[in-house]
Image (cartoon, helix red, strand yellow):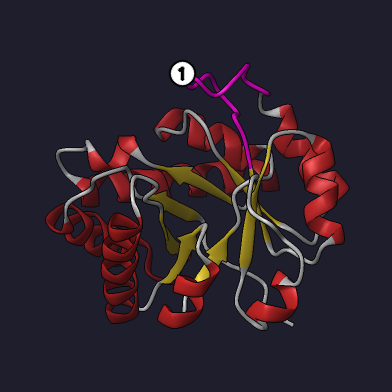
Amino acid sequence: MSSRPSFEVLVVTPEHVTNDALERVLRAGAEALGPRFAVQARAKSSPHERERVGTEVVRLATDLGVACFVNGDVVLAERLGANLHVPSDMLREGLRDRMQTAWISCPAHDDDDVLRARDEGFDVVLVSPIHRVPGKGPPRGIEAIERAKRLAPELHVVALGGMGLETAREAYGAGADAVALMRAVFEASDPLAFFRALENAQKVASEGAKR
């Protein structure tokens, strides 16, 4: 059985990301957050690109001591010793046994997806889209996080979709264990300052929940 995830920020790599951009953002995330930071290597344009991004992400994550996931390729995840993200269209049969102690994550576009992830022994669920994202369907709102936490408290619930500093604070306040970012941090002029501001947003939300 895998250990319970503890990361609070998950960065998902954008398509055609350069190695320089990966290093800049991942090093900033690790410096600001340490083991509370994780990254998902997502590259769908070609097998070659998936191999390049996955290999570079795992190299950096290992060097920095942070968790990493490979998106949609169980063979590559096994070979690189990474955790696995399972897209909606990927076969799931036997994955829990095959990945052994690695974390497995999947998307949840409705409450049934959360229950399915729980019943199939997954560790992490990416609840989305919380806010409006072009091409991703209607936003589900912050209530989707609250429902996911009630339905499957054993899962690590990650808020995805329209996450920035303000929306992240709202997501943490609703009970999200982590928030997922893509463009916001890769487009930031100062990723380290961005991650530190995000860390502060989580602290503010946590302190508010204790009152």
Q: Can residue 2 be seen in this snapshot?
A: no
Count of all numbered marks drawn on residues in the image? 1
| Image location of residue 206, percent across then percent down | 59, 48
Foreground of the two, 99 or 60: 99
User: In the figure, residue 107 lies in which quadrant?
Assistant: top right
Q: Which residues are magenta?
A: 127-140
Q: Residue 69: horizontal and vertical position, in percent?
A: 48, 64
Q: Which residue is mark 1?
A: 134
Left or right, 1 with reference to 200: right
What kind of residue is marked 1? Pro
User: What's the residue at 52%, 45% (across, down)?
Assistant: 179
82 relative to 162, above or below: below
Element type at mark 1: loop
| Label 1: few (<14), some (14–19) or many (≥20) C-alpha neighbours in 10 Å | few
Q: Is residue 4 visible?
A: yes
Task: In the rendered view, tell whether residue 25 sits above or below residue 5.
Answer: above
Q: Quadrant of the N terminus?
A: bottom right
| 104 is within the stretch colored magenta | no
Q: Nearer the viewer, residue 204 or 189?
A: 189
Q: Position of residue 54 (x, y in %)?
A: 35, 65
Residue 134 drawn in magenta: yes
What residue sits 74% from the left and 28% below the top? 143
Horizontal and vertical percent position of residue 11: 40, 51
User: Which of the 4 image quarters holds residue 165?
Assistant: top left
The prevailing secondary structure element of the residues shown in magenta is loop
Q: Would residue 142 appear left or right of 190 to someone viewing this image?
A: right
Residue 144 vs residue 175, the one in the foreground = 144
